[in-house]
Amino acid sequence: MSNRKSAKGQPAKKKEANALWGGRFTTGPAALMEKVNASIGFDKALAPQDLRASRAHCTMLVEAGILSRKDGHAILKGLDQVEREIAAGTFTYTPALEDIHMHVESRLAELIGDAAGRLHTARSRNDQVATDFRLWVRDAIDRLDADLRALQAALVARAEEHAETILPGYTHLQAAQPVTFGHHLLAYFEMFDRDRGRLRDCRARLNESPLGAAALAGTSYPIDRKATAKSLGFDAPMANSMDAVSSRDFALEFMSAASIAGVHLSRLAEEMVLWASQRFRFIGLSDAFSTGSSIMPQKRNPDAAELVRAKAGRIIGCLTSLLITMKGLPLTYSKDMQEDKEPTFAAADQLELCVQVMAGMVADMKVNKEAMLAATRQGYLTATDLADWLVQELGMPFREAHHVAGRTVRIAEQRGVGLEDLALADLQAIEPRITAKAQRVLRVEASVARRTSLGGTAPSRVKAAVKQARRRLGQA
Ligand code: ARG
């Protein structure tokens, strides 16, 4: 016991104080302190953004006359070398150097000597990490936008193919009215379009530069925040230095949008799981996106769809975790905020994976039109059409028409047949004014063809919606 304590709980006496900030320290941290404190294990993902922001900062320092051209040049060359080492996998990471910012600076010092120490002039890790992280989230949003667009394109292609394919539409998962499969798929096109819109909104709001806020109060150096903002592609510098280093609402907003997109994906995934089951047999998932069972040779399991369905939970968990971390934190930076990255990275990575997998499944799924049509023969899907005919042709009040149509359903149920199979005499026994024309509206093809209202399921509408969707994707 006592051995273990001296090994882990006590300061490591031999260890020297941190080279970058250890001025007032006489010894290094306990091994456990190093372990809890280090973020390098995950924030090395920020390396490209950190290098980019450091270059912008360095260039600005030179232009503002804060740093000599010679030192500036040495720093930029050194940063290029660091970038090459990271790309080549020869860069060494150690928990002792805490985070990516200190790793880059410390390697820079090895490479170029004293000039490296001047890069951190008029900057703090607080504005540095806020800048890097915003750039990272912005990059993730741009990748996700392209992925979501590809998923939308897959949906549109399948919708066009199935503008006339009829299947039951459900409410309460009870067969409700016939719809076209293209229409059903385009519902998701719209959801993913709004998801892209939410990410765009988030991007527009996050696109301001924290760089130059320094630790929290700004700086006494004559820096040019507008120049660094511009060179990093930000619209402007953030207005308040304390807000700049304290705020993570951009990550929360990103994960909120990601959570909603994850929920949309999970609903489509769940429908695919249902559709691929033996009870439905509406679709077949390709070998590429299903797995077999180690014991039941006949099985083809929709694992990819199930995982997409599940991962929404993880993404929501990521959002919740950062919301709780941020709640109640005083201004400005607290180390709690180092916990912002893992959930944000995970939410982005998982969502990106799910969107790509879903696009693959949509493109690959085999659509079983016959099974879809056969399913419309059950559940009296055209009962509403009969009620509508009674209203439109006989001027019957809808409530009464609903009652009459309900009685035909009861008769069909007693005989074990579909509404369209009832003889005209059976229908006339319920309502004598019913004619053979009414029988024709009981066919599912007629039912969908008549639903031509704006946004409706009629094949003519779906074909027009496909064209419009292609225009929105910039495909036509
Ligand atoms: N690794 C830190 C983080 O991710 C960087 C900022 C550290 N700032 C500080 N004052 N300790 O939040």
Image (cartoon, helix red, strand yellow):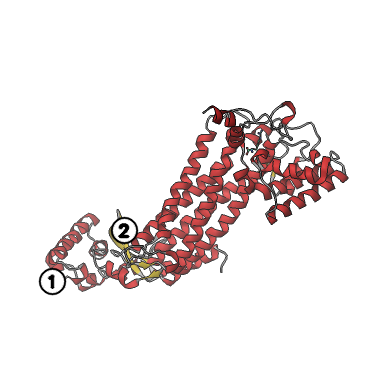
Which residue is under mark 1? 425
Please state the horizontal and vertical placement of residue 333, each as a whole percent of the image.
Answer: 63, 32
Q: Mark 2 near mark 1, Cβ–Cβ under 8 Å?
A: no
User: Quadrant location of residue 58?
Assistant: top right
Q: Nearer the viewer, residue 219 or 287?
A: 287
Q: Which residue is mark 2?
A: 170
Residue depicted at x 43% and y 55%: 307
Identified by mark 1, the residue type is Ala
Name above or below for residue 208 compared with residue 365. above
Q: Indicate the amino acid at tag 2.
A: Tyr
| Whether residue 15 can be seen here | yes
| Above or below: residue 446 compared with residue 235 | below
Q: How many marks?
A: 2
The Cα–Cα distance between marks 2 and 1, rounded to whole angstroms, is 30 Å
Which of 173/393 is in front?
173
Disc 2 packing (10 Å; few <14; some 14–19; many ≥20): few
| Element class at badge 1 | helix
- Labelled disc at residue 99: none
Q: Is residue 430 left or right of residue 370?
A: left
Q: How many residues crowd around disc 1 within 10 Å: few (fewer than 14), some, or many (20 or more)? A: few
Q: Is residue 237 visible?
A: no
Q: Is 32 situated above or below 132? A: above
Place of residue 281 in the rendered image (x, y in percent of width and height, measured from the top left): 32, 67
State the image coordinates of residue 182 (x, y, percent, origin top left). Answer: 41, 66
Residue drawn at x 22%, y 54% as measured from the top left: 399
